[in-house]
Image (spheres, rainbow, N blue to C red):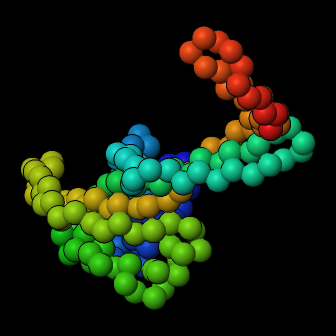
Amino acid sequence: MTNEELFQVLRPIVLLVTGVPNCILADQNNKAPNGPYATIRPRQSVTERGQANIYSKNILADKVSVDVRSQIIATCSVQFYRGEARMYAERLKQCNKRPDVSAMLWKSRVGWGGTDAVNDLTALQSANWEQRAQINVRLWYETSNVAEVNNILHASIVVQNEKGQTLATHDI
């Protein structure tokens, strides 16, 4: 999944669950919206879960299609600015248990891998304290990498002793 696709999955959830009025993609080099808002940085970090699932199938007479499906865990950073920033972030905790959120994730073929602690990032901004908070959300999804390779259609097996004398041959 691309950053944009992950953003499109997570944005409606953030808006619905937290009640924050605006949610934008992080690091866009634009002016900040007025009032409280959230930013999402998809794929803050990417890791994998276990080993990939490998699916093979014969195609045509002499080819094999191999589909390597990696299980990806993307850590998405969600930051809240102004208003009740810590409360907004706290509302994302266990929100995947809500039926509406669960349905959104299922339709997008994305799993919810939990959240980290809410970080208070309140800072002095233009001589005023501005409420800020940050939480990491782990999303699970699968990627597919397909390759077509040649199929081994014929092999010969030759059994020899230590002196190099042929004892048996088989064609498979």
Is residue 39 shown left or right of residue 87? Answer: right
User: Is residue 34 or residue 66 the one in the foreground?
Assistant: 66
For the point 14% across and 55% down, the residue is 121
Q: In this image, 116 relative to 12: left or right?
A: left
Do we see residue 33 in this rendering?
no
Give the image location of residue 91, x and y in percent: 27, 77
Q: Would you identify the image quadrant in which residue 172 lies?
A: top right
Of 102 and 21, nearer the camera is 102
Q: Position of residue 3 (x, y in %)?
A: 50, 49
Single out the residue that lies furthest toward the right.
61
Residue furthest to the bottom in view is 99
Q: Give the x, y percent position of residue 67.
A: 65, 48
Q: Nearer the viewer, residue 54 or 35?
A: 54
Above or below residue 80? Residue 165 is above
Tell me the residue at 65%/21% (across/down).
160
Please indicate whether residue 5 sits to the left or right of residue 172 in the image: left
The residue positioned 12% from the left and 52% from the top of the image is: 123
Seen from the viewer's position, the closer of residues 160 and 149 is 160
- Name, please, the residue furthest toward the top: 163
Q: Which residue corresponds to the image point at 37% horizontal and 84% vertical from the top-left?
A: 97
Please determine whether, in this image, residue 59 is positioned above or below residue 102: above
Residue 156 can be seen in this image: yes
**For residue 50, above or below residue 172:** below
Q: Where does the image place residue 118, in percent across and percent down from the top left?
A: 18, 65
